[in-house]
Amino acid sequence: MTFSIKAIIRAFVAPEHRLSMPRKMWRNTLAELRRRGGGCTESGAFLLGTIDGTRRRVVTVVYYDELDPDAYKSGVCVLHGDAFAKLWARCRMFGLTVVADVHTHPGVALQSGSDRTNPMVAREGHIAIIAPNFAAAPVRQDALGIFEYCGGHMWFDRTDAHGTRYFYNGFWG
């Protein structure tokens, strides 16, 4: 039986979480999204990690424009097909999978019609996080939009009451 003190504490601190990410990595990701979008365009990233049952743990981040240099050219996040080939190759190289994605929006973190009909990863259980105000600091946990893909262009909204327990990005992440 394999276990760790960190996993036990994380389960106690955030017992309902489905996605966890170390606090420092989350803060660095938001800062990098802010920088890449320059406060005027959307920016985004895939969160790579592991899946254990219903729990997803982020271990590294790949930004959309690393996969497709023109990803932010239109002002919204658009990835072309070859970007996904690069993404899957990276996943294979590190033995990881895409556990979630995060992208920024101007204003509040509502899921747009384009977000709903064009999931970055169209697999049931995929988690999409939207950071408000192009990730301008500070980004409060309760201001995030958190959505879980159910398939068939249907999403379960994990925002509001579920968000702070669903996505854990604290010290024990």
Image (spheres, rainbow, N blue to C red):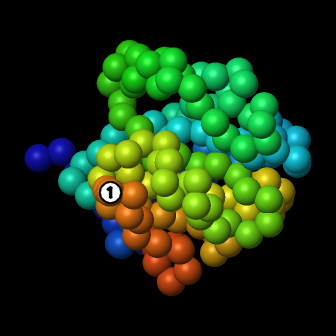
From the top left corner, tell me how far across and down residue 87 is, in percent.
47, 24
Does the rendering let one see residue 70?
Answer: yes
- Direction from residue 108 to residue 11 in the image, left or right: left
Which residue appears at 80% of the width and 66% of the height?
107
Classify 12 as above or below 37: below
Q: Tag 1: residue type?
A: Gly
Across and down, in percent, residue 43 comes to: 72, 42
Asked which quadrant contains residue 150, the reply is bottom left
- What is the crowding at mark 1: few (fewer than 14 residues within 10 Å), some, or many (at least 20)? few
Dot 1 corresponds to which residue?
152
Q: Is residue 87 visible?
A: no
Residue 42's spot in the image, x, y percent?
75, 46
Identify which residue is drawn at 60% across, 39% down.
45
- Residue at image coords 58%, 54%: 114
* Residue depicted at 18% across the width and 45% down the height: 2
User: Closest to the observer: 119 or 104?
Assistant: 119
Apparent side of residue 139 relative to residue 117 in the rendered image (left or right): right
